[in-house]
Amino acid sequence: MGIVLSYFQAIVIGLLQGVTELFPISSLGHSVLVPAWLGWDHLVNAQSADESFYLAFVVALHVATAIALLIYFRADWARIIRGFLRTLRTRRLETPDERLAWLLIVATIPAGLTGLALEHALRTLFAKPLAAAIFLTVNGLILFAGERVRRRAAVGKLVAKHPTASEGEEGRRLDTLDFQEAGAVGVAQIGALFAGISRSGITMVAGLMRGLDHEDAARFSFLLATPIIFAAGIYKVPDLAGHLGDGIRGQALVGSIFAGLAAYASVRFLMRFFETRNLMPFAIYCLAFGAISIVRFA
């Protein structure tokens, strides 16, 4: 069997995954569109195949991205895990960390169950250039609408009912979300099963609509993404260890290193970016790249 994935392609796709998984611009959409633009048609076709070497390769990139998130938020996760273990002992929620642990659990359930049931069917149906371009444009509209809704009086009233997050942008504290609201954010994650819809973007919008500021909406989104991405990667690891990984394990290792480094740099940048900025630059990018890609692949 010839080389189906070069080391150069592995590095490009690894960097792409590490950035686009966290930037609210859809990693799955870009993993379809960028190879299509570059003429890597065998990778594009493999994306929507029932079984493929490309999916086995992407598994490794997902695990690397999740590890980068775990490293960046290691202090947060240490507090959250300690809080969770305390709740098992005391059977009460007494601290913000204890509450956040259960908010994350509640928010993880909808996307986790739906992903197990529908990921394969949705990927084989929609992980194609034109569909990804359309959904990426839709993603831009979602980000744009989220910013508009965030400025409405109803959201302001919601913020006013709760303790604020910080002295900067006005927004309720993350631990003031109730379980129904966390579940709604979790349901929003399901949209990311469509190539072109960003997991981080759609969950940030859901958080903003519940009165979080941009920084806390991003923090909750990244914390929520970590177990989902990691679990999806581990679930698919047998693909990489099996026959689908033949001939690409070295490329998977190299791609993972670049994906992990890119993901760590991305989360550091974004957490600072959202201290003072919003989703509008990403909305404009998605609308522009999505529209150009629709014209190209229609």
Image (spheres, rainbow, N blue to C red):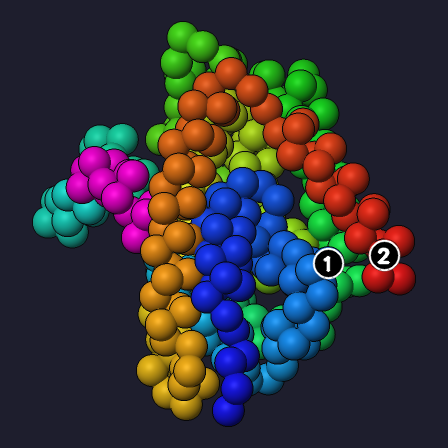
Could you say which is closer to the camera, residue 48 or residue 44? Answer: 44
- Residue 33 visible to an observer of this rendering: yes
User: Do labels 2 and 1 touch, CB within 8 Å?
Assistant: yes
In the image, the segment drawn in magenta is 67-79
Task: Name the residue beneath numbered marker 2.
Answer: 296
Q: Residues within 10 Å of mark 2 (few under 14, many from 20)?
A: few
Q: CA distance from mark 2 to mark 1?
A: 9 Å
| Amino acid, disc 1 | Trp
Q: Is residue 216 magenta?
A: no
Task: Name the residue beneath numbered marker 1.
Answer: 37
The residue depicted at 69 percent of the width and 60 percent of the height is: 38
Residue 112 is situated, as x and y percent measured from the top left of the image, at 45, 63
The residue depicted at 45 percent of the width and 85 percent of the height is: 244
Residue 113 is situated, as x and y percent measured from the top left of the image, at 47, 67
| Amino acid, disc 2 | Arg
Could you say which is closer to the camera, residue 190 or residue 35? Answer: 35
Residue 278 is situated, as x and y percent measured from the top left of the image, at 59, 24
Marks counted in the figure total 2
Q: Is residue 52 left or right of residue 240?
A: right
Residue 138 is situated, as x and y percent measured from the top left of the image, at 76, 47
Q: Secondary structure at mark 1?
A: helix
